[in-house]
Amino acid sequence: MKNFTVKIRIFLWLILAGVTGWLLYMAAAPSGKISYVADFTKSSYFIGKLTPEERLMPIEGEMPLSRVIIGDPVYFSLRTARRFDKAKLTLKYRQSEDAPPIIEAGVLADKIIWRYDLQPIENKIIGRLAYVWDVKNENGLILLQRNDSASTTLYGSIEDFLNKPPQNSEIALYNCPLRQKQSEASDLNMEYLLRDYKKSAENQPTVPAVRGAYQFYTYIKDEDLDFTFDFIDINKNKDSDPIDLNLYYGNQIIDTRHLDDDGIANDNGKESATRRLSLKAANLPEGVYKVELRANDDVITEEITTKQSKLSFVAKIRLAGAGAKNIGLFTDSNEISAQTVNPGSLQKIKIGDNELDINQTYKQFNIETGQGVKEIKLEKDDVILAGDGVFGFSEEALINPAFKKVDGKLDINSVNYILAKYEMPAEENGWKIAQAEFDLSGAYREQGRYNFLISIPGLRADGEIDDWFEVGEIRVELEGTTLLKRIKNIFTNQN
Amino acid sequence: MFYIITKELFYTLTAALIIFCALELAWPGVVLAYININWVLIFWLIVSIIVLAADRVNNNYD
């Protein structure tokens, strides 16, 4: 009998040891590779639910085999037991005929400025043009060339195109980072130079107070870069409020400044004294520079003092509630959105010949204004303005070095070449399958979760068009350091 | 024999609960990703009751 007890005991403890070992193996992923799948038939521990629910078709009855997205964007989290370096996202999807042309997926890279690293899933514009334009594929890049015009030079290869590019105005890019000529890691041998630029000897007019993070372009030619920022911290959020200023040239950070929190890391609402940060750099080559302020919404830039005549905020600007009246801005954005959280800032905004009625707080109001520069007139501040272009406080201050982007707003007749880093999705049994790769080494991870989004610009839950995007399966293949390498790194004191 | 098996199962499940909870505290998600500890606890409770009942019958306490 005792022999039998021992056998049973050994058997059961071996099972427990096996289960524990398997759990540790799955969590540690010793090979550095693991993949997770969510097919919506049952909830997945690793791949979270698509949210928010308002942007998804409601579920009626049993658990569906897919989820239908009706609003943009939707988010999901990926829970992992350890960090990984790379993620390959595979989406199985289908969509309505009239669904917007661009589908992208992204991973949250920076939580302070809510920056997602977006990668293409499908671009229907490139897909359609690939049937009629000349196509060159090389090293993951695709070059489309208009072949119905005698005046258009047809390049034999992408290398030729990059070595002797046409005029910037003829080119549209998609998922192709533009790097300037002087940059060492040059993908595209093109640079944005202003022929008629003249430096200013005077300080530029003061910019109204701006809240939170922002990025702006400026231009340097035979002058020093010289900016002075005056900040206050309104301490309305619980977190500490450090400030980081980054200066970019050709997508690379060339200078940084840092300011610690004002010492009040709680939400007592006590305004700090004005603190100053200077960003100066001499002997810079001519070209466009980007300044990025990384700070949370407690930080208000009261004043930006500069002699630089070009200063254009990229894509978004949040005017602080400093009580300013009758503010004038200029933008080259086609689609502009405005939002306020302050009931006292509800107003009608004049944008060129159009009017945008902000009659509700916390709601984003959108308007399409057409191409070209237009003036925005606000009665009051404390408004968040966003658009697909730049914003400046004078028409002369506007500068937008960005190439045309292949999106739903692109006038195809205005370009002759499209350069994209893009792979067309495959088709299988009525479903499309597309893949996107993400660098997770710098991605934001909180409580073991990476945050992803699926972006379909133009898909609106409250829109009049009955368009949709159906996700059949989300698969994420992860790749990171192997267990052996991690152990070696510990002994060699590497990360 | 039934009593022996359930008693051994009880010991193993007790150890499993302790190990799983300790693992989960040390490395969140390592167990819960695959095993719902609530079900292990329920199973452990059922086995415990059976062991107690079988023990009572075996030793004829009444």
Image: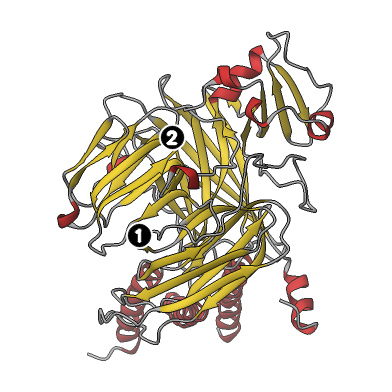
User: Residue A182: x and y, percent?
Assistant: 77, 51
User: Residue B31: x and y, percent?
Assistant: 49, 70
Residue type at mark 2? Val
Q: Nearer the viewer, residue A103 or A4?
A: A103
Q: Which mark is residue A493?
A: none
Q: Which mark is residue A373?
A: 2
Mark 2 and mark 1: span between their CA atoms?
Answer: 20 Å
Give the residue number, with chain letter if any, for mark 1: A208
User: Residue A234: x and y, percent?
Assistant: 31, 75
Q: Secondary structure at mark 2?
A: loop
Mark found first going from the N terminus, 2 or 1: 1
Q: Secondary structure at mark 1?
A: loop
Q: Is residue A123 visible?
A: yes
Dividing the picture into quadrants, the one containing residue A152 is: top right
Q: Is residue A226 left or right of residue A419?
A: left
Residue type at mark 1? Pro
Quadrant location of the C terminus of chain A?
Answer: bottom right
User: Residue A227: x and y, percent?
Assistant: 54, 66
- The residue at 30%/86% (across/down) is B56
Quadrant location of the N terminus of chain A?
Answer: bottom right
Dividing the picture into quadrants, the one containing residue A262 is: bottom left
Task: Classify 10 Å Cα crowding around label 1: few (below 14), some (14-19), many (20 and above).
Answer: some
Please tell me how many numbered marks the rendered image carries: 2
- The residue at 51%/63% (across/down) is A306
